[in-house]
Image (cartoon, rainbow, N blue to C red):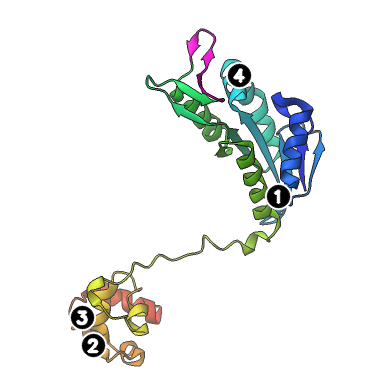
């Protein structure tokens, strides 16, 4: 479940209800509640059990107000960090840099904001966000529209709640560059596997295949001297091969 703060930030209770309903429309169990810090809160599956996630939402007007008051860094960020194990800052709005570096926001038309008598610059906004997330220790995401915000928070909820933490494996990948197109033919399984040995690569793997007739048994039985007799295989690469195959130099 996601708890949506019933005060709705600068938008009030009506805004909170709309944001709750937007999450429900995406199949997420969401309810209004009172949060000491953050606009959204949930509990997910962490590496050692439950983990608390809190999201502070800042619309464009909220951000400009925060530039004046320093309330976010002085009060809200410390509270988020203390209350939640995974705190987030989420900003919302359609922005661009104007011709003179000013911060422009689309609200039916492009508008420029001021902080007191000074025009707000895009660099002010970027600096404010960077300081907040880097110094405050928050994760960060930006959404252009309210519908994007609902989609992101629903996706965050699914990530944390639909799987155990250990089931997230998309980061466990090994990059293996493709063979040179000059090979034209699909490399054998022998070549593919040998090419993964550190510093071997496709060209040396082909030479090793030729020297061993593609036999792992033959490769396993080769001495350091035998390996260095293969074209392109020097001492360091021969050592890599031996360490990979045998776990030690022989």
What numbered label is drawn on residue 210?
2
Residue 249 in sight:
no
Q: Residue at x 29, y 69 (%)?
A: 199
Mark 1 to mark 2 CA distance (whole Å): 57 Å
Q: In front here: 60 or 236? A: 60
Q: Nearer the viewer, mark 2 or mark 3?
A: 2
In depth, the one of 134 and 11 nearer the eye is 11
* Disc 3, SS: helix
Q: Which residue is mark 3?
A: 228
Q: Give x and y (percent) for residue 109.
A: 52, 23
Residue ranking furthest to the front: 108
Label 3–label 1 contact, CB within 8 A: no
- Measure the C-alpha gap from mark 3 to mark 1: 61 Å
Q: Residue at horizontal 75%, vertical 46%?
A: 24
- In the image, what residue occupies the spot 51% across and 29% down? 131
The disc, 4 or 3, on the residue closer to the chain's N-terminal end is: 4
Alpha carbon separation for disc pair 4 and 2: 70 Å
Q: Nearer the viewer, mark 3 or mark 1?
A: 1
Distance from the alpha carbon under mark 4 to that under mark 1: 31 Å
Please tell me how crowded label 1 is: few (under 14), some (14-19), or many (20+) other residues with Cα within 10 Å.
few
Chain-order first, disc 1 or disc 2 = 1
Q: Residues within 10 Å of mark 3 (few under 14, many from 20)?
A: some
């Amino acid at each position: 479940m996601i708890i949506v703060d019933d005060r709705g930030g600068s938008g009030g209770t009506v805004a909170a209800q709309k944001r709750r309903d937007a999450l429900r429309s995406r199949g997420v169990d969401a309810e209004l509640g009172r949060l000491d810090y953050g606009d959204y809160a949930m509990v997910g599956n962490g590496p050692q059990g439950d983990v608390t996630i809190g999201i502070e939402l800042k619309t464009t007007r909220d951000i400009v107000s925060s530039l004046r008051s320093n309330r976010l860094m002085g009060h809200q960020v410390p509270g988020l960090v203390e209350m939640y194990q995974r705190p987030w800052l989420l900003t919302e709005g359609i922005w661009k840099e104007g011709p003179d570096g000013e911060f422009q926001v689309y609200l039916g038309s492009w508008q420029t904001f001021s902080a007191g008598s000074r025009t707000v610059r895009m660099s002010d906004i970027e600096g404010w966000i960077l300081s907040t997330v880097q110094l405050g220790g928050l994760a960060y995401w930006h959404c252009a529209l309210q519908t994007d915000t609902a989609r992101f928070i629903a996706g965050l909820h699914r990530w944390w709640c639909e799987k155990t933490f250990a089931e997230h494996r998309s980061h466990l990948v090994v990059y293996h560059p493709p063979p040179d197109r000059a090979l034209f033919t699909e490399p054998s399984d022998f070549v593919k596997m040998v090419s993964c040995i550190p510093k071997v690569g496709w060209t040396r793997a082909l030479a090793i295949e030729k020297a061993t007739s593609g036999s792992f048994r033959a490769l396993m039985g080769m001495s350091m001297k035998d390996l260095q007799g293969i074209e392109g295989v020097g001492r360091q690469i021969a050592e890599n091969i031996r360490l990979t195959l045998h776990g030690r130099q022989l």
